[in-house]
Amino acid sequence: MAQLIYLTTLLPLVGFLINGLLGKKIKNEKIIGIIGSGTIGISFLIVLGAFFQTLALPVDQRQTIVHLFTWIQAGNFQVDAAYQVDQLSLVMALIVTGVGFIIHVYSIGYMHGDKGFGRFFAYLNLFIFAMMNLILADNFLLMFLGWEGVGLCSYLLIGFWYDRKFEKSTTSDAAKKAFIVNRIGDFGFLLGMFLIYLTFGSLNFNDVFTRAASLNIPQYVFNFIALFLFIGATGKSAQIPLYIWLPDAMAGPTPVSALIHAATMVTAGVYMVARCSILYASAPAIMTVVAVIGVLTAFFAATIGLVQNDIKKVLAYSTVSQLGYMFLALGVGAFTSGIFHVMTHAFFKALLFLGAGSVIHGMHDEQNIQNYGGLKKYMPKTYITFLIASLAISGIPPLSGYFSKDEILWYSFANGNFFYWLIGAVTALLTAFYMFRLVSLTFEGKERFGHDKHPHESPSVMTIPLIILAVLSAVGGFIGIPELFSGDHGNQFENWLEPIFKPAQARLAIYGVHSNAEEIILMIVTLAGVIGSIYAARYIYLKNNKPAENLSKKFKGVYNLLLNKYFVDEAYDAVVVNPLVKGSDKVLWSFADVKIIDGLINGVAGLIEKISGSIRKIQTGVAQFYALIMMLGIVAALFWIILSL
């Protein structure tokens, strides 16, 4: 099955072409949905077959290169269209196709009746095509092709409802913001790729990583490569300072938020850093940068999520925060833990977004949680599944988020320092608080919606995917039970990925003997804090007689600061956007374009017009005059010949 892995990119491409070119002619939503979802479902089965085939092989034979054709050949430079099937790419492929298939099925119900139904599924299929190229590529250039492809699909899907307003602007503005910010990060990726080729003479993963582990290369070279690649990751995976596009990406349909901006695309940066683990292990200073940016992003985004009132905005900042956890893990050398959290996060965050979509669908497009309340009696399936996901992301055992988040916190303490753990633990408390604020205001308490709203449960095509993701959110963490509890069997997920990260771990040499007692104490402290945060959220928003608005009055300054997202967007507008716009208007257009470029062109045209006007005067149309001129010319020519003899 591994040799058929190319079908997992070909099938979504075929789905894109059929729905994109013939969607308006097909018109039947069921056929369009079956084509769009079926291509992803078959791709998932192929990846699953490749997984079991790889699992049966000896550990040292679990990498398969599927060569399709030579893509670029120029002198000594050669890049193949080839896919690398190994433990890491299979984990990511299972997430993308598995969760992707569930979200495609959900979209059949959510997008029912939309005028762009066929176009929507075409874009989703195109995204899966690009994402699968990104994670299966066996070289940096093919990865970059997928990297840019998912960026394009993100732009198309964020602005899908191009005729709708979004906050103070439009969905098109949000799409452009995402596209432009990601281009900034992509420039860093390109610089890293150029430096990799100059240093190692190849863009092939196996060649680069083998040479990185064996060649004697100056430290600063590794530092620059790792830093440039990480700049690309900060853009794609929404880390400080390039995180600002992700909250605005909520302008797109909710399944887009679930698939692209929660479960798959935003984890591309995490995957890229993990794939380049040996390069980062060779640049410990940049690993520190990764850890610091990750933990600060996790905390920063969590504080903003505390006061947001748009149900999707809360989840958006939660996504940014959880991505910060993943980079914290990578920064302290816990590469397996970071990928483990990618997997569990895909389950519970996709469920949260789809649950939010179910609520929005049932509340007739209302997204303000202040206008919800008491919805659990109207939407019992949505409520139960949303509650499971909230418990998972909060880190309540034995749900999936508990195992992955606790593992990150432990390694941030064991491999990093106490402050990494402290900020990560506080962020976990904040996560539990804002998630149960969301649950309380949405599903419990008094009904705060008007009589014009008639909330209802979503159809089965939407609730069944919720149930499947709820099961995965509940049991998905058992595949990575920490060694503390699994005994001699060890962490199965870690064992599976060990060959991928073994060279990096050998270079880091940070895993040593640690105290089980320390791990248990930190685990208990964090869990106690999380439970306390859940209780506090429920007390403040359900049991306290004072309305929640009093909190905003009591802590007005901090509340406004968080509600306005630390005014980061305003700062960017003041420092970057507005000066560029004004400079472009007054300098580049008014002066450079109008006065210099247009002036030069118009001046040359005017000069030629005057000269031609003067010459035109000798064109009298009188034949005798032309004859006289010819005679004078002949006489002048004769004089010139005679004098030159």
Image (tube, grey):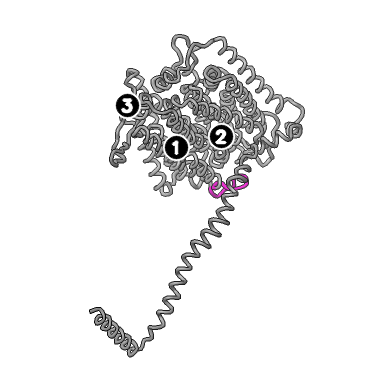
Please name the amino acid that badge 3 sits on. Answer: Thr
Horizontal and vertical percent position of residue 217: 39, 28
Q: Give the residue pinned by disc 1.
A: 189
- Nearest to N terminus: mark 2 or mark 1: 1
Task: Residue at 62%, 44% (x, y): give it.
Answer: 167
Q: Quadrant of residue 127?
A: top left
Q: Where does the magenta region start and end?
A: 162-172
Q: Give the residue pinned by disc 3.
A: 64
Report whether 38 appears left or right of 301: left
Q: Nearer the viewer, residue 153 or 376?
A: 153
Tag 2 secondary structure = loop
Tag 3 secondary structure = strand
Whether the magenta-drawn stretch holds residue 168 is answered as yes
Q: Is residue 575 visible?
A: yes
Please name the amino acid that badge 2 sits on. Answer: Ile
- How far apart in space, not on screen, are marks 3 and 1 (Cα)? 26 Å
- Nearest to N terminus: mark 3 or mark 1: 3
Q: Nearer the viewer, residue 495 or 231?
A: 231
Depicted 49 relative to depicted 104: above or below: above
Q: Quadrant of residue 226?
A: top left
> Do the CB atoms of the residues marked 3 and 1 lie less than 8 Å apart?
no
Task: Residue at 61%, 24% (x, y): give it.
Answer: 423
Report whether 205 appears left or right of 309: left
Horizontal and vertical percent position of residue 555: 74, 32
Instruction: Please give the label number shown on residue 240.
Output: 2
Q: Nearer the viewer, residue 498 or 482?
A: 498
Label 1, residues with CA under 10 Å away: few <14, some 14-19, many ≥20: many
Label 3, residues with CA under 10 Å away: few <14, some 14-19, many ≥20: few
| Quadrant showing the N terminus | top left
- How far apart in space, not on screen, are marks 2 and 1 (Cα)? 16 Å
Depicted 572 relative to depicted 489: above or below: below
Q: Is residue 398 visible?
A: no
